[in-house]
């Protein structure tokens, strides 16, 4: 029996992907903070679908967490053939206005945990005839956004790492995909961002369930880069060919609304656990 392991599975895109995978008959290992939302998600999936669902409540920003997740799977004979690295969070505002410790936490969750989990599970994934790694990046991975400097840096790392690892694994059964969604309405902070962007935010905004359906379908088709939505796809392509100086001035003007509006978006940390100004 094989399992799909999803991090940040208690809310947002991770939760939506858990339901989407379950609807396809995929057994699940759900990993998130040890919070009631994690266990409620698992119980709801069990009620709706005839799949096995197991949970591990853990803080992925702890250095030993990836090894602990891997050992939990090994000790319980959870044979993982799909690894979905979804957990992450971001913030906005002038770089120096957010606490340094928050940036360190962001790097730990968005990058270090993803690398650690991939490193632990990759040898086992290669033992399968067909296996998948789906890393959740962002449409912003290709757009160095002023007032979201560290967040877009972490997402750019995920994007580059995923493409490089895919080539390394080309002659194995492991297909590496990277998901680059545009704005997704996952929490009250997302609604605040939507309001701050006005009409343009509403045009780009997608719901987690929409993103999850596209993401899982494309992952199973072994797509390299997955950008849900026609408009986000076109924007990414257009900005790639735009001169850098012009692009950066345009992005600064668009995202100036974030300058003095620190917003934290999370899919792996409780809002209350992130330090604020």
Image (cartoon, rainbow, N blue to C red):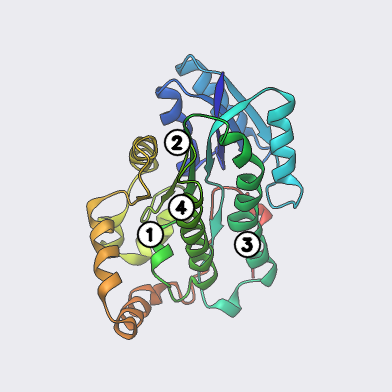
Res 17 quadrant in image: top left
Report the residue at 61% width, 72% height from top: 98
How far apart are labels 3 and 1 at the CA level?
A: 18 Å
10 Å neighbourhood of mark 4: few (<14), some, or many (≥20)? few
Looking at the image, residue 55 sits to the left or right of residue 259; the answer is right
Of the numbered discs 2 and 3, the one sitting upstream in the chain is: 2
Mark 4 sits on what residue?
167
Residue 107's label in the rendered image is 3
Determine whether the residue tagged by mark 2 lies in a helix, strand or loop: helix
How far apart are labels 1 and 4 at the CA level?
A: 21 Å
The percent position of residue 100, horizontal first and vertical second, equals: 67, 72
Report the residue at 61% width, 61% height from top: 106
Residue 139's label in the rendered image is 1
Nearer to the camera, 167 or 19: 167
How far apart are labels 4 and 3 at the CA level?
A: 24 Å
Residue 17's label in the rendered image is 2
Looking at the image, residue 270 sits to the left or right of residue 94; the answer is right
Res 41 quadrant in image: top right
Query: In the orientation shown, which residue stands out farthest toward the front?
Result: 171
Q: Is residue 32 visible?
A: no
Determine whether the residue tagged by mark 3 lies in a helix, strand or loop: helix
């Amino acid at each position: 029996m094989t399992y799909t392991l999803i991090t940040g599975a208690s809310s947002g895109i991770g939760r939506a992907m858990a339901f989407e995978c379950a609807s396809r008959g995929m057994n699940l290992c759900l990993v998130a903070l040890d919070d009631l939302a994690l266990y409620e998600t698992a119980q709801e999936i069990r009620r709706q679908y005839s799949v096995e669902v197991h949970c591990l409540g853990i803080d992925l920003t702890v250095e030993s967490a990836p090894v602990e997740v891997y050992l939990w799977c090994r000790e319980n004979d959870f044979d993982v053939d799909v690894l979905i690295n979804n957990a992450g969070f971001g913030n906005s505002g002038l770089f120096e206005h957010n606490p340094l410790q928050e940036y360190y936490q962001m790097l730990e969750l968005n990058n270090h945990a993803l690398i650690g989990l991939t490193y632990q599970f990759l040898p086992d994934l290669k033992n399968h005839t067909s296996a998948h790694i789906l890393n959740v990046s962002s449409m912003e991975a290709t757009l160095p956004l002023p007032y979201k400097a560290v967040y877009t840096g972490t997402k750019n790392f995920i994007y580059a790492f995923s493409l490089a690892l895919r080539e390394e694994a080309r002659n194995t059964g492991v297909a590496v995909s990277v998901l680059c969604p545009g704005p997704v309405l996952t929490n009250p902070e997302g609604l605040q961002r939507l309001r701050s962007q006005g009409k343009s935010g509403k045009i780009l905004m997608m719901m987690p369930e929409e993103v999850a359906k596209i993401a899982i379908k494309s992952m199973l088709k072994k797509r390299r880069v997955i950008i849900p939505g026609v408009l986000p796809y076109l924007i990414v392509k257009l900005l790639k060919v735009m001169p850098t100086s012009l692009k950066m001035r345009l992005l600064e003007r668009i995202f100036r609304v974030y300058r003095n509006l620190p917003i934290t978006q999370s899919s792996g940390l409780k809002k209350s656990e992130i330090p604020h100004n």
